[in-house]
Image: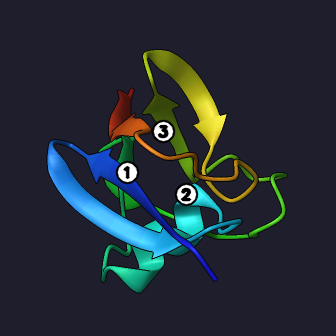
Amino acid sequence: MSTVHISFDGEQLSGREGQSIGGILLANDYRTWRTAAGSERGIFCGIGICQDCVVTVNGVEGVRACQRTACEGDAVEREERA
């Protein structure tokens, strides 16, 4: 299986081709990557309903990390919401 490389807040991470962004973040020991109402959030439901895992991908806000397949070179950033 091929490897895919993404950046997360400027750090280079790798995962398996076909893996979700959330899966790559979890595999690289990230458990949270969004702040909402002062609390850290990451994957909760894992199926795109709760929206706790949203990130900015290539400048597009509100991307569900649990549903978005990682693509080579994706630039992923944390989101902060009130």
Rendering coords of residue 10 (x, y %): 15, 42
Q: Which mark is residue 6?
A: 1
Q: Which residue is mark 2?
A: 21
Left or right for 48, reference 26: right
Q: Nearer the viewer, mark 1 or mark 2?
A: 1
Three-letter code for the amino acid on which mark 2 is drawn: Ile
Q: Which residue is mark 3?
A: 55
Three-letter code for the amino acid on which mark 3 is drawn: Val
Q: Are marks 3 and 2 in contact (CB under 8 Å)?
A: yes
Location of residue 33 with respect to 54 vertically, above or below: below
Q: Nearer the viewer, mark 3 or mark 2?
A: 2
- Residue at the location (38% across, 47% down)? 34
Q: Secondary structure at mark 2?
A: helix
Spatial CA span between label 1 and label 2: 8 Å
Left or right for 35, reference 27: left
Q: Quadrant of the C terminus?
A: top left
Which numbered disc flags the more N-terminal residue, 3 or 2? 2
Three-letter code for the amino acid on which mark 1 is drawn: Ile
Rendering coords of residue 30 (x, y %): 32, 73
